Image: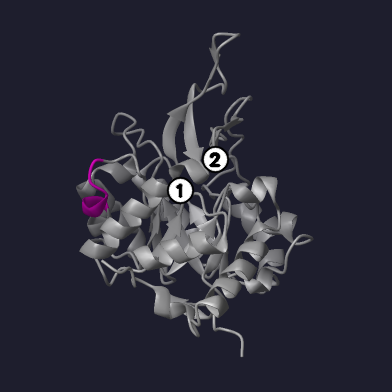
């Protein structure tokens, strides 16, 4: 008998612990030719804002050692475009649809959350709090616990579906941020978003992306992501965690589960290997067979200290 991969996460019934991460998998349809989406526990969509966004000027992506730097600028079709053009197909994808969303103000976050929550076919909402708060000097919403708690609570009041908060790693105390999100009413946490970084073209003496700084992702950030997942799990053992950061193999999934995650999100690798999530699932199953693990839930938080 094949090992069981099915599990529950923050109210979602997931076929497996492997999701795909926001911003790396389009709106799902783009990857349908490469893998069976129904095998995934969920798809986190591109971040959706109240109105369409064109994103940042090019160049806005570059390869780095063991990773990628991006400054896409949260380009997306907006709530209405998502509801009209993207969600009908996603409803038929066979997996959970986790809609990542954001705003530039409190009111925009709340309005966006309410509008998305009302759409049929949305399984959960994932709040991106790595956005600059334009009314507070450009500081990210997700770096001040009191602000994050207030924002989460405001969105919680208008959202009936599971509400996840995607945490920024650009903070001195990820546990304080995680606790604030849960106290504000979050059902779960996604840990982590990209780490702020920079790349320079030495011959041209210019930054490699137009905005100078961008978000670093890929295998280079995996140790940081594992550390933060583990710290939050140890401090908040009842908080469901979706681990993100450099996942490239079945054993990477196991490491995140042992650290305390319940699910994981495959991100940057999908750019280079569109079917990566399926391969990673196969490798996870092979690991479980070799280690005689009958149920993937046995691995969650089971790190031998």
SS under mark 1 = loop
Q: Where residue 102 is drawn, which disc sits there?
A: 1
**262 or 25, which is in the foreground?**
262
Q: Where residue 74 is drawn, which disc sits there?
A: 2
For the residues marked 1 and 2, what is the alpha-carbon distance in whole angstroms? 9 Å
Query: For the view shown, which residue lies furthest in the bottom direction?
Result: 1
Earlier residue among tags 1 and 2: 2
Relative horizontal placement of residue 32, taking residue 255 as reference (left or right): right
Percent x, y of residue 289: 56, 79
Percent x, y of residue 155: 36, 59
Q: Which residues are magenta?
A: 172-177
Quadrant position of the C terminus in the picture: bottom left
Question: In this rendering, is residue 296 above or below 197?
Answer: below
User: Residue placed at 63% from the left, 46% from the top?
Assistant: 77
Answer whether residue 105 is visible to the viewer in this image. yes
User: Residue placed at 35% from the left, 46% from the top?
Assistant: 106
Main secondary structure found in the magenta portion: helix
Quadrant position of residue 165: bottom left
Relative horizontal placement of residue 254, taking residue 249 as reference (left or right): left
Question: In this rendering, is residue 268 above or below 36?
Answer: above
**Is residue 176 located in the magenta-colored stretch of the structure?**
yes
**143 or 41, which is in the foreground?**
41
Answer whether residue 96 is visible to the viewer in this image. no
SS under mark 2 = loop
Quadrant position of the N terminus in the picture: bottom right
Q: Colour scheme in the image?
A: one colour
Percent x, y of residue 85: 71, 56
């Amino acid at each position: 008998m094949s090992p069981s991969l099915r599990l529950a996460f923050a109210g979602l019934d997931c076929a497996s612990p492997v999701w795909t991460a926001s911003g790396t998998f389009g709106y799902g349809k783009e990857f349908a030719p490469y893998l069976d989406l129904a095998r995934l526990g969920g798809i986190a969509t591109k971040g959706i804002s109240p109105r369409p966004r064109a994103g940042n000027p090019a160049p806005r992506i570059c390869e780095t050692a063991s990773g990628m730097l991006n400054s896409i600028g949260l380009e997306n079709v907006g709530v209405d475009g998502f509801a009209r053009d993207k969600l009908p197909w996603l409803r038929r994808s066979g997996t959970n649809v986790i809609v990542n969303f954001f705003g530039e103000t409190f009111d925009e976050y709340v309005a966006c959350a309410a509008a998305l929550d009302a759409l049929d076919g949305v399984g959960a909402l994932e709040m991106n709090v790595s956005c600059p708060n334009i009314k507070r000097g450009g500081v990210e919403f997700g770096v001040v616990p009191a602000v994050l708690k207030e924002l989460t609570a405001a969105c919680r009041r208008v959202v009936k579906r599971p509400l996840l908060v995607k945490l920024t790693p650009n903070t001195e105390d990820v546990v304080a941020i995680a606790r604030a999100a849960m106290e504000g009413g979050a059902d779960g946490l996604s840990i982590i978003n990209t780490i702020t970084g920079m790349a320079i073209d030495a011959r041209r003496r210019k930054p490699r992306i137009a905005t100078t700084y961008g978000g670093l992702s890929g295998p280079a950030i995996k140790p940081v992501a594992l550390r933060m997942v583990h710290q939050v799990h140890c401090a908040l053992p009842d908080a469901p965690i979706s681990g993100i950061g450099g996942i490239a193999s079945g054993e990477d999934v196991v490491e995140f589960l042992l650290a305390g995650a319940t699910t994981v999100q495959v991100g940057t690798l999908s750019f280079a290997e569109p079917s990566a999530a399926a391969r990673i699932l196969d490798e996870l199953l092979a690991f479980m067979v070799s280690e005689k693990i009958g149920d993937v839930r046995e691995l969650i938080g089971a790190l031998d200290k």
